[in-house]
Image (cartoon, coloured by chain):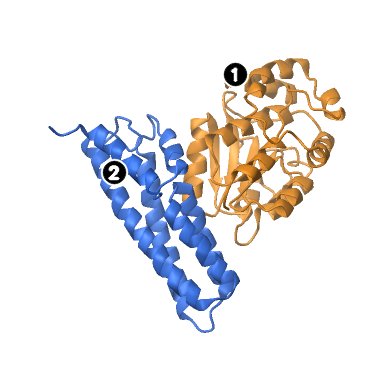
Chain colours: A blue, B orange
Amino acid sequence: MDKNHLQRQLEMKRSLLDQGYLDEQFIQLEELEDGDNPNFVEETVTTFYANSARLLQNIEQALGSRPIDFTALDNCMHQFKSSSTSIGATRVKKECTLFMEYCEAANAEGCIRTFRQVKQEHASLKTKLENYFKLARQGGTSAGGHAGRS
Amino acid sequence: MEGNVVVSRRSIDGFGVSPYDPEEAHVLAVDDSLVDRKVIEQLLKISSCKVTAVDSGRRALQFLGLDEEKSSSVSFDGLKVDLIITDYCMPGMTGYELLKKIKESSTFREIPVVIMSSENVLARIDRCLEEGAEDFIVKPVKLSDVKRLKEYMMREVGFGSENNGVIHKRKLQESRDLNSSEPSVTSSTSPSQLSESPSRSPISSPSVPSSIPTPLDSPIRRLKMTNTG
């Protein structure tokens, strides 16, 4: 017998938390869902991914220019890191922090290498969250467990 | 913490004659990040606040009617602002610069201003508090932070900026109990505080009675508890 959707959703979330993909901030966002905003978490995550695509592109371009403007890079990454933090994307945030350290040291190689990791974590989390929200929708609840619009 | 407390505050201050909803405080949130604006908006809505969210210091000043050097006691759409919460790092005008502009304005300097930042740099915190910021919150902002903000909105009204200066000096000089738990005790006492208006004496005394929220706990507590910026 299949476990019910809510159970699977909770287990998936637990797993994402345990593996460090998400942190307490994600839980906080779920607590902000209410009757008026039953899909707040999914909307916020969607906004994050729409927005971050642009930021990552800016960083990509900045990394490609010679000489590299590390200040501009740092500013871009700061913005990206800030939004990653706001949705509780722990692993993404860690790579951002590392990236910014390389920026400060004006270490181009380190930046380029770390940026690959940033993109990887960013993409990986996207897939996992898409699965999570899909599961929530199938169960007839929003991410925060509210009976919401599917 | 119930919205009905705000009603008595409004009648004490006699400030805004424009239409307002006495049940809800109005917060002006400033952040260049779309995601962060969305989150702070929801945090405030959940906490029964009306929110106006703008993406820059410039727009915040425009909303307040300060940008054109016009003097008006309320923002152009007639809503009084009870609190301004702004990100520190923003392109163009930083949150610190916005804070200065607000505190320089005779009309708006009484509005409590709270700074948010993803970095917990002590020098930055000190600079903001010295400039008159009510509090400094290290991101990500939590529901418990917003609950604390409501205390400022209720405490500040009707008291001159002179009080603010004294409060901030005290905040910088005193070392508070860094391990104190959240000041939940204050929310239950704030209604009585309003009717007694004990603001004068507690502020001048060196020790802070529990009826006044101790915002100093917050930036320092966050410093200790936040592991990364």
In the depicted structure, whether residue B7 falls above or below residue A26: above
What is the three-letter code of the residue carrying label 2? Answer: Phe
Q: Which mark is residue A26?
A: none
Q: Residue at x 42, y 58 (%)?
A: A51
Evaluate if marks 2 and 1 touch, with contact meaning CB atoms under 8 Å apart: no
| Distance (Cα) linking label 2 and label 1 | 38 Å
Badge 1: chain ID: B
Q: Tell me where residue B36 appears, x and y as whole percent.
A: 50, 48
Q: Tell me where residue B116 appears, x and y as whole percent.
A: 61, 47
Tell me the element at label 2: helix
Badge 2: chain ID: A
In the depicted structure, whether residue B8 falls above or below residue B107: above
Q: Quadrant of residue A113?
A: bottom left
Tell me the element at label 1: loop
**Can you name the residue that lies furthest to the bottom here?**
A66
User: Mark 1 highlights which residue?
Assistant: B4
Q: Is residue B137 left or right of B197 when viewed as pictured? A: left
Badge count: 2
Q: Tell me where residue A34 appears, x and y as whole percent.
A: 40, 30
User: Mark 2 highlights which residue?
Assistant: A133
Of badges 2 and 1, the one in the foreground is 2
Q: Identify which residue, B153 or A42, lies in the foreground.
A: A42
**Can you name the residue that lies furthest to the left here?**
A1
In the depicted structure, whether residue A146 falls above or below residue B219: above
Q: Tell me where residue A87 appears, x and y as whole percent.
A: 44, 47
Is residue B67 visible to us here?
no
In the depicted structure, whether residue B197 falls above or below residue B133: above
Q: Is residue A131 left or right of B216 when viewed as pictured? A: left
Q: Residue at x 38, y 57 (%)?
A: A50
Q: Is residue B180 left or right of A26 when viewed as pictured? A: right
